[in-house]
Amino acid sequence: MEIDIVTKLSCFMFCAGVLTVLLRRDTILMLVGIELMLNAVNLSLVGFSSLHGELSGQIFVFFIMVVAAAESGVGLAIIISLFRAFRSVDREAASELKW
């Protein structure tokens, strides 16, 4: 059985997101990579859901989108406070934050 184009695209998107998180030092680009990984999972869930004719995958996509929106809000708030403290959004500056 051949893998269809949706699965290939979601795999490519997920790998690009992982590489973005691992290789970039900029915190905003790391958040973009995490969002890319979540959207890749959403795409594969919708593809498998339509392949099998069930709605359960699309329900999971709704919950993942809610979590992604909350993650974006919290992540951007942390980035703004990091920028105010260190005038940089480099992830190495976050290691200087101590209790």
Image: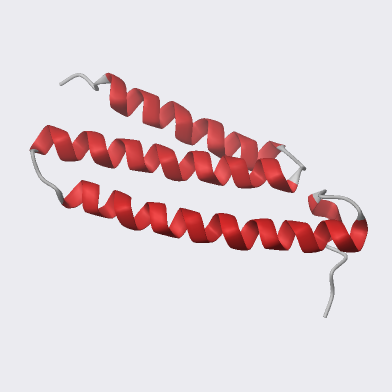
x then y, percent, for residue 24: 72, 38
Residue at far bottom of view: 99
Q: Is residue 82 above or below residue 38?
A: below
Residue at image point 84% right, 75% down: 98
x then y, percent, for residue 32: 60, 41
Q: Is residue 55 above or below residue 40?
A: below
Residue at far left of view: 53
Question: Left or right: where does residue 10 sit relative to residue 29?
Answer: left
Number of dots carrying numbers: 0
Given residues 1 and 98, the one toward you in this image is 98
Colouring used for the render: secondary structure
Question: Left or right: where does residue 7 sit relative to residue 91?
Answer: left
x then y, percent, for residue 63: 33, 58
Given residues 5 and 58, the one toward you in this image is 58
Q: Is residue 89 above or below residue 82?
A: above
Residue at image point 69% right, 62% down: 77
Question: Left or right: where does residue 25 sit relative to residue 33?
Answer: right
Given residues 38 and 69, the one toward you in this image is 69
> Which quarter shows the N terminus?
top left
> Which quarter shows the C terminus?
bottom right
Q: Quadrant of residue 80?
A: bottom right
x then y, percent, for residue 57: 21, 47
Question: Left or right: where does residue 63 sit relative to residue 78?
Answer: left
Given residues 23 and 41, the one toward you in this image is 41
Residue at image point 47% right, 54% down: 68
